[in-house]
Each structure stands twice: as C-alpha cells, then as structure tokens.
Amino acid sequence: MSGIYWLASYPKSGNTWFRSFLFNLQQNGDAPADINEISTGKIGAHRDWLDEVLGFDTAELDHEEIDRLRPEVYRWSLRDNDVGYHKIHDAYTYPSSGHPLVSCEATLGALYILRNPLDVAPSAANHWNLNIDETIERMGQHDMALARNRKGLPSQVRQRLLTWSEHVLSWVDAPGLNRLIIRYEDMLTDPITTFTQASHFLQLPTDSARIEKAIRFSDFKVLSQQEADKGFKERPVKAKRFFLNGQSGGWRNKLTPDQVQRIITDHREVMFRFGYIDASGKPL
Amino acid sequence: MQYTGYNLLFQSDIPLPELLSHESDKNALPDVAIRFATIGSDGLPDGKQLGPFLWVSAKELWLQIPKVARFLVQGGNTILIDPEPGIDEDSLRVFLLGSALGALLFQRGYLVIHGNAIQIGNQCMVCVGQSGAGKSTLAAGFMKRGYPILADDVVPVDKACNALPGFPRIKIWQDVADHLKIDTSGLRRIRPNIEKFNYPLQQQFAAEPLPIRWIYILGSENINNIRFEPIQGMQRYPLLYNNTYRARYLEGMEIKPLHLQLCGKLASKIRLARATRSKSGFALDQLIDHLLADMASNP
C-alpha cells in the first residue's frame, strides 16, 4: 500500500504532540524519544521535498504556481510504495479547479486535530510573537497564511490557513475525504480512547500496552522537560517556549472577557458544532 | 548570438544578457547550442521518469516547467527550449540558466554543486545548504565586502577539483538587498512575478577557475552564537553528495559513477565544516567574519 496520511491542524492545536505520540508508538522504545529527533514524516510545505521531486526550484515560482504543482508532488509519492505520515497546516483548498492541494489520489486519509480556539489564541500569540488581540484578528482573516513573505526565501512555501473556522470546515467537510477528527481536549481527558482511535485510523498498532506507553512518553511534562533541558529545534525564534502549558481551559486566565467574546463572535458556528460553546454562546 | 560562461562558448537563439557576450566569430565552434524547438510532451522513450516533470536517460534530460517551457538537454552540447505560448523570456532564462544548464554540466562530466563559489585569495570557498539556509544572502554579503564571485547557485567542479566560473551575476532577494542597502530600482527581476533581482557583478566576477579549498554547509538553529563543526572521515562523502545540484538528475545518467568518484576526490581535499547560525535574525557580518577566521586558520 502507498499513499499519505495527513496530520492536519491549524497551528498550535496539538500537531507536534500527536507526532511525538506517533513517533514513540512507532519506535516502541524503552524511554521517551528525543523531541529533537521526532521524525514521523515530512512537512507538506517544505521546499526540499517539493524541489527534489519537481527537479526545479520553487524559489523561482510564485505562490500560486507552487500551489498548482503541490498535488503533483504528493501524487508522485505513490511510487514510494510506502505509507507516509506527513504534517500539514494548510487549509484544504483547491488551487486548480476541482483538484485539492493534497491530491485525492495520493491521500489515504487525514487525521484532523482540532483545539478550542480560545486556547489556540494565547498559544498562537506566543508562537507568532504577536499580542493576543492581533492574534485573534489573524485567526479571523480569510487571507491568513504562513510563510507568505515574497521578498525572501523561507524554508517552507506559503501555506494558506484561511480563518480558524474556515480551516476547520475545509478539512472536516471536504467532500470524499477519508478523515478522523480528534479534539485536543479529548487527547487530554480521554487519551487511551482518543489515541487508540487515531492509531486505528492510521493503520498503526493499537495494542493497549504500546498505546499507553507512547502516551506516557509523549506526555506534556516529558516534552516540556526535554525542551527545558535541551531546547527544541521547532521553537520559533521569538517564542520563549514551544511547549507552553499543554492544558485546556488555560484561556480563562489569559483572555479578557472582551477577547473571549470576539473569538466567539468570529467562530460561533464552528465552536458550537464541536462543543466549545453552548447554544447561547457560553463557553463550555 | 554567442556568449561565454562556465568556460564554454554558447550559441543561443534566446538573448542571455546575464552571460558575457562574445564577439561572433564564424570560425569559433560553439561548445553548446541553445535553440528553440518543438519538444514532445511524453518524456524520453528510452529514459527513466524521475519526477512528474522529469525524465533522464544516459545522455538526455527532459524537464517540463508547467506553463513555462519544456527543456531537452542533450549530450552535454545542446539545450532545446519549447516555450509555452505567451511566456516571457526572463522566465525561460531562469530555468535555462538553472536546471537546464546544471543538467548540461553534469552531462559534460563535471561534479555540480548546489551553492555559491567565492574567491578568497587564490582559492575558492563554496557555501552550500538547504533552501532558505542563506546561501545567496551570504554570497551577496561577500560581494558587498569586495570579494569576487565565481558562480551563483550552480557550481561545476572539474577533475582537478577546481570550481569553474559561471557568469557575472548573482540573484538577490529584495530582503537581502534591503539588508545590504542595495538599490533594486534599476535591476531586472529574474521573473516578472518574483521579487528577486539579477545583480550584475561587473568587476567583481572571478573569471578564472580556482581550486576549492573550503566548503561550508550553512544552517540555522535556535542557538545564540555561530557554531562551526568540522566534518571528518566517512561523514564527508554523503554530505557532499547531498549537496550535489539536483542529485536526482544523476539517477539515469551514464556519468553517475564519474560523479561519485569526483565527489570522493573532492571530499578528501577540502576543509568541510558546518557553519550554523542563530535562527534569530541573520547576523551576516558576524557570519562572514567567522568564516574568514576559519579559513585563515585552515589555509
């Protein structure tokens, strides 16, 4: 079998945590894997992957040209005769009419990791080195993208995120996509069930001892202690820490009532659908 | 029109203002012909498909840049271009002088490195690294300090481990130009839709082959200072090979064994080190100072 399982999420929604679990599950070692050695697969937007398969430089292409070529690169990986678990932050978009960015043919499925936007906001603010108000604004912008600088050469190509709500809906409602949606909050409160479900979906081992060990080895305290001891290569330069607090509900101490209200106003429908607010708009 | 570059004489259907023009001489036989032609869309019948847009056979390479052109590079002496209707010449030149020329240099038996070659004294330093590692920023920084540049992006190495001079221009991103206070208003964009410019080197072009003495693998990490790590022994060869210009091209080429041999020879001759800078901002002057110091202590 060959193809790609996408590990998809809006930034700061538990993707790295999940990949750490996945790596520990695959390694099945006697001690937690080093966070700086975690390699579960590639990053969908990494230039090195795209350039290598294309045979020419994405550095000489504009964002739209690159987006139109990305599905071809992913389709090419079908020849690897292997299943890949690759991280992606892009929204599920259609760069050329009818053809999704991730390529239908190449995609075996997508694990979509969802997190309460009230907790995403403070975490993303730290990650993007913005204040919380600016972050809330970005999370509501349709043209929000990562690595959008056109004046230089970031190591990743531009990734369109859309608004937080649009990002979620683009993946969870994508027609014909084999998907499993898991919530960050459920990874915390009911890890065994949630991670077992995810492993099953990804066609990985599901025996309980192995799952339990991988959960323990990728526990927030382990990841955060490793970062404190040795640093973490994926930490953005301007962020003090990558693994910030690993909780749900931390927003209650970090957001003002006005900020909470703005997030709810911007994302009401999707927040209700995934159980982050009640019908009256009150956070749960 | 005739041009010189990489120690070769080119006869080209498409103007190549980046190269040095050569007074046309009917008696001079060009080494390389660059011509417009119709190229089939099905790749190479006797070749191997190595990517969605790439085919390679023993002596040919077929490359398609969708919506730009198809290129057919043959026998180390011919590059055919089949442009898409309405495409601008600059876009053709970018891929012609990059991928297509790189493939041609492979076919001519050179080891081709993905990096920038800079003259230091009477020797040459080559900087390599992943996309976005800062290769072109560093080349521009050395250029700004008055060091001559041999080649930008595509560095061919001959059997004696000399780097060959390419042509007198470097490509500069707007960000780098801003940082180095280079005015881009009079410069031509490499393509109309990309904020990267052709910067003519004029006097600062090193036009003669030079022995390669140092290769630095650029990288960036979450560290506070610049870190140098010399690479010894068995590790040297794969690292050098990984920084080959589009190593994938080699898969179907008959010159692959020669390339591997040259790679080993070069690895045994040079100082190879990782130069890792801090991710937080590009302390360009500091990096150049450190590189110069490292070269001075390993002459």
Image (cartoon, coloured by chain):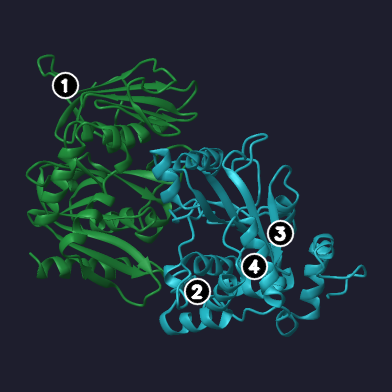
Q: Chain of mark 2?
A: A
Q: Quick check: marks 3 and 1 in contact, CB under 8 Å?
A: no
Image colour for chain B is green
Residue B27 pos. (x, y %): 9, 15
> Disc 1 marks which residue?
B30
Residue A266 pos. (x, y %): 79, 63
Q: Is residue B21 visible?
A: yes
Image colour for chain A is cyan
Q: Quick check: marks 2 and 4 in contact, CB under 8 Å?
A: no
Q: Quadrant of residue B258?
A: top left
> Disc 2 marks which residue?
A238
Which label belongs to residue A55?
A: none
Q: Residues within 10 Å of mark 2 (few under 14, many from 20)?
A: some
Q: Chain of mark 1?
A: B
In the image, residue A56 sits, relative to residue A129, either above or below, namely above
- A191 relative position to B119: left or right: right
Q: Chain of mark 3?
A: A
Q: Is residue B18 visible?
A: no
For badge 4, the amino acid type reads Phe
Tell me the distance, in whole angstroms, between the alpha carbons under discs 2 and 4: 31 Å
> Disc 4 marks which residue?
A195
Tell me the distance, in whole angstroms, between the alpha carbons under discs 3 and 2: 31 Å
Label 4: which secondary element? helix
Q: Mark 2 vs mark 4: which is more N-terminal?
A: 4
Tell me the distance, in whole angstroms, between the alpha carbons under discs 3 and 4: 11 Å
Which label belongs to residue A181?
A: 3
For badge 3, the amino acid type reads Ile
Please check whether the numbered discs 3 and 1 fall on a single chain.
Answer: no
Please check whether the numbered discs 1 and 2 fall on a single chain.
Answer: no
